[in-house]
Amino acid sequence: MEPPALRRSDHLTFKGNLRETRHGWLRLTPAYSVHLVGELLAEASRESQVLDPFCGTGTTALVCAERGIRAETTDINPFLLWLCEAKGRSYRETELTALRSTARTVVSAIRDRSATAAWTPPIHRIERWWDDATLAALGRGLATIRALSAAAEPIEGGRAVPDLLLVAFCRTLIERAQVSFGHQSMSFARGRGAAPVVEPVAAAEAVAVAWDGAVESVARSASTPISTPPQAVLCDARNLREQLPADRYDVVITSPPYPNRMSYIRELRPYMYWLGYLCDGRSAGELDWQAIGGTWGCATSNVGKWSPEGSGAIPHAGFDELVARIAERSPLLSRYVHKYFHDMVRHVASLRAVLKPGGVAHYIVGNSKFYDVLVPVERVFASLFEAEGLEHVEVRAIRKRTSKRELYEYVVSARKPF
Ligand SMILES: C[S@@+](CC[C@H](N)C(=O)[O-])C[C@H]1O[C@@H](n2cnc3c(N)ncnc32)[C@H](O)[C@@H]1O
């Protein structure tokens, strides 16, 4: 059934978060909106224990932290867990003063072109991201952050100041990169493929200005109160019981990856390489292979060789016909869709185990289209919830996703029986 005509509602996407405090620290297009999480939290109380098994940039965890609600969140990407921890921490005034004064040392290093060449990350074709002079200025900035963080005399506040410096560094590196955010994922700005030759003094100055702006914005937003910092745990959502206790969570609010071939590792690679979470293409592909729906590097060739454990049956009427129709055009994409839901079957079973009896789960998902085959992701999720014995399964369309007809976002909700 066609969902009701919904306008593209930017306040229900990441764009709505940009104006918000800490939520706008780093951009990830698939991040969902603070407003939507707030709405879904309506039935939670201060006693509730919330879980987001697909942390991403930590939107659910941070909204809870700001409202004094206990939240735990998991992801397989350690960089995102680090970011979530930094976003959800309570910062004292003395730490923010230390941040501003330490940042002045960093900006001097960014401007100081006499310094010896600093380390820059092994990103493939890095010249497409930054010209040489900008790269050198960023390298000097990061080397100084690292040296200050490792100094014998610890910076006020333990991890607090180093983490905020790194968040400001991430904002600076992306602001000075030649990438465009006009699309669903990052892309190189049209017509600016190769790096223009930039005058070194001007390039360093541009990085210094971006740095000062980022530090001030991060310092201001970090001053907002946090009453209950979230717990961020490295865990594969297909096996939540490895890290989380059974029957614990009253409310789950999450957006899992969609089966749309988007790679979070690819999107996040500039930050992850600079901060040392990735060191080469192989490690990037391997991490994306752990991600549900990952397709980057070796993840795609692995999907090509994948076959399901056991029968591989997905408990949704018509699923086999759906993947057979996609297979007529592309056996690889058909396998991709099959594997995505095969992983989600495992996830939903482990979700059920950690939900408290009577606990509710809200999943924000988008449907997908492969050639002319529409994959009703929301209805397959509803079937997976029902197959796991969850009740009151409901699907609600919340917004139109792109200018492409038929692509919508939905909230799929369900309750674990008492
Ligand atoms: C759509 S994003 C979540 C966005 C988030 N709601 C936000 O506001 O930023 C999905 C997340 O699921 C994570 N993920 C993918 N596969 C996973 C797995 N097997 N276990 C845990 N997390 C996984 C990805 O790393 C990504 O951060």
Image (cartoon, rainbow, N blue to C red):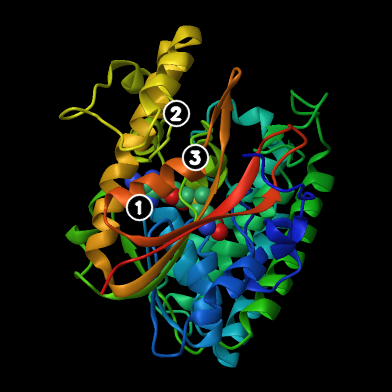
The quarter of the rendered structure image containing the C terminus is bottom left
Residue behind mark 2? 295
Q: Earlier in the sequence, mark 3 or mark 2?
A: 2
Whether residue 114 appears in this view of the structure is no
The quarter of the rendered structure image containing the N terminus is top right
- x and y, in percent, of residue 353 in the image: 22, 62
Q: SS of the residue at dot 3?
A: helix
Q: Residue at x 33, y 52 (%)?
A: 386
What numbered label is drawn on residue 385? Answer: 1
- x and y, in percent, of residue 329 in the image: 50, 9
Instruction: Give the quadrant of residue 63.
Output: bottom right
What numbered label is drawn on residue 135? Answer: none
Which residue of the protein is positioned furthest toward the left in this rendering? 310
Which residue of the protein is positioned furthest toward the top in this rendering? 328
Q: Are marks 1 and 3 in contact (CB under 8 Å)?
A: no
Q: Residue at x 64, y 49 (%)?
A: 138
Q: Earlier in the sequence, mark 1 or mark 2?
A: 2
Residue 353 is left or right of residue 361, and the answer is: left
Q: Determine whether 91 is above or below 258 in the image.
A: below
CA distance separating discs 1 and 2: 25 Å
CA distance separating discs 3 and 2: 18 Å
The foreground one among 377 and 50 is 377
Residue behind mark 3? 377
Q: SS of the residue at dot 2?
A: loop
Residue 79 is left or right of residue 234, and the answer is: right
